[in-house]
Image (cartoon, coloured by chain):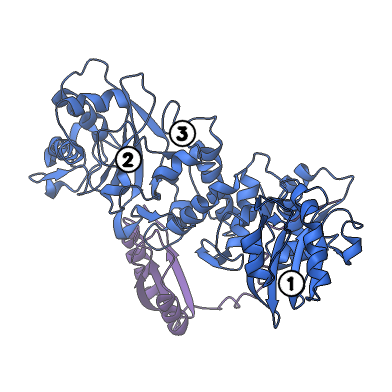
Chain colours: A purple, B blue
Amino acid sequence: MTTLLDPTNEKRALNMERVGRPESLSGLNVGLLDISKARGDVFLDRLEERLAEMGANVLRYKKPTFTKPAPVDLRHEIAMNCQVVIEALAD
Amino acid sequence: MNRPALPDGLVVVVKRECETCRMVLPVLSQLRASGVELTVYTQDDPTFGAEIGALHDGDLSVSWHHDIETVPTVIRVVDGVERARTVGWLRTEWEMVTGASGLGPDLPDFRPGCGSMSVDPDLVDSLRVRFGASTLSARRVDVASAEDEFEAMFDRGWTDGLPVVPPTEARVMRMLAATSRAPSDVVAVVPPDLVEVTVEKVAINAVMAGCKPEYFPWVLTAVEAVCNDTFNIHGVLATTMPVGPVIVCNGPGTRAIGMNSGMNVFGQGNRANLTIGRAVQLVIRNVGGGRPGEVDRATHGNPGKISFCFAEDEVGSPWTTLAASRGVANGVDAVTVFPGEGPRCVVDQLARDPESLANTFASCLRTLHNPKSVLAFDAVLVVGPEHARVFAEAGWDRDRVLDELHARLQIPGTDLVRGANGIAEGIPTHLEGVTLPKFRPGGILLVHAGGGAGLFSAIIGGWANGDMGSTPVTREVTR
């Protein structure tokens, strides 16, 4: 028998239950996260129009750069203010 | 295993195989007869020194824990604390440590000792595991005897697609011996899972990559260099572009560990070049959780994502080194990490004057990523020795070469705007009247490397640069 040392981080993924899907977006705060990829704003502008028509209260957010994870403060702010978030990946 | 305490008085460690130990046996009897507190440990033959009550250090625990490198070793212990030590036989030293006089009157004044069994190269790995492995905290994975350990490592997803060296405790302990840092020291926080990686975990992955222990400080430094917000290995890993960390090594240490800076510098055949870069990538895979098809979204990738690491040819270079140009003192070992794609060759066999060669370099650099792309990407220009000679003979130093290249890479907006030259890609049309540089200031990293024959150089294209993406990082190697 050979004993090896585990090269991994030995972490176990945390299983978290998803928040239930809302019946309607009307009256909800919907966050739109622009990841700062070129023309992502074009896509999000159109989404904002459509969401507003549905009665959603749209809040816009933007990552400083698409190459890095959203800063923790930004993630926290979105979580505190929004019931729904849409992240735009575009080019 | 706990470190065994030394008894007060005199402690002497010997072995029968050592001629000097046999020679001093009468001296030990003389000390015993004088009534001094004396404890003798014999490493090999348990009957050696039986007449003076020698104890057998059969598992070499005393020798290991008290750093016995030579036999005989004489230690004076007071209240459990070592106060003095001598090795071999030097009468004056023995008399000073023991406080006795007239020792071994018939013996020569001096005889060197022999190597302690606790530092015997054939034993030291197993001793390190026996006495030191308890300091390791990684989970132990038992591979059954009927199981193929190489297949078991593939099955567990621990490899980059090539076989890896089994990370046994003995191999990992040997790797750890190459650094002064404690196994539990945190080296960096590794994306994408943002996990703290310890020296021990880096050592495990360095073993798997095939590193020799003497490469380990370079691996540790390279891991530190990529895992930070400046280099942004998260983005380098996650991008759809074909880049990975390119590691350029500088300093006399590159020669000491046998790195290749010459012929076939980016290619196969050099263990240090290939395994240092591979170890960094295995850390990102195994500790950071960065795997292709998951957070690694590369459209094509490149073969250098297994390992892309090389040394600058400093000895043959007409220029200051890359590391020196980035603030590291000459003679200090350092790594520079660059987010790079695969190298491409620059051919110019006719240039004999620096202007002509600079024109070729600029023309090739101009096409990087897209001839109409400006300011977005950096590049490493690896100048081969035959090309470097053309510049050197004309007296062009590093700064002159870079200045000449940047001057040739100022591009009129009319060539860059969207639609120009029949290419939809480009900058917004309102910039038509502006002249823009292909590279930002400092965006070309000049390195001297490659074989002595061939009027060739190489370009390694970069990735989104600056705060938006990645900035090259240079770090001194610490041991």
State how far apart marks 3 and 1 are (Cα). Answer: 51 Å
State how far apart marks 2 and 1 are (Cα). Answer: 62 Å
Quick check: do tags 3 and 1 share a chain? yes
SS state under label 3? loop
Give residue B380's mark.
Answer: 2
The residue beneath circle 3 is: B260
Q: Classify residue B359 by image quadrant.
A: top left
- Residue A30 position within the rendered picture, expressed as x and y whole percent measured from the top left: 43, 76
Q: Is residue B241 visible?
A: no
Q: Chain of mark 1?
A: B
Residues at badges 2 and 1 in contact (C-beta under 8 Å)?
no
A14 lies left or right of B432: right
Q: Is residue A40 visible?
A: yes
Q: Badge 2: how crowded within 10 Å, few (<14), some, or many (20+)?
A: many
Give residue B10's mark.
Answer: 1
**Numbered disc in front, either 3 or 2:** 3
A25 lies left or right of B86: left
- Residue A36 position within the rendered picture, expressed as x and y whole percent measured from the top left: 34, 61
Tag 1: amino acid = Leu
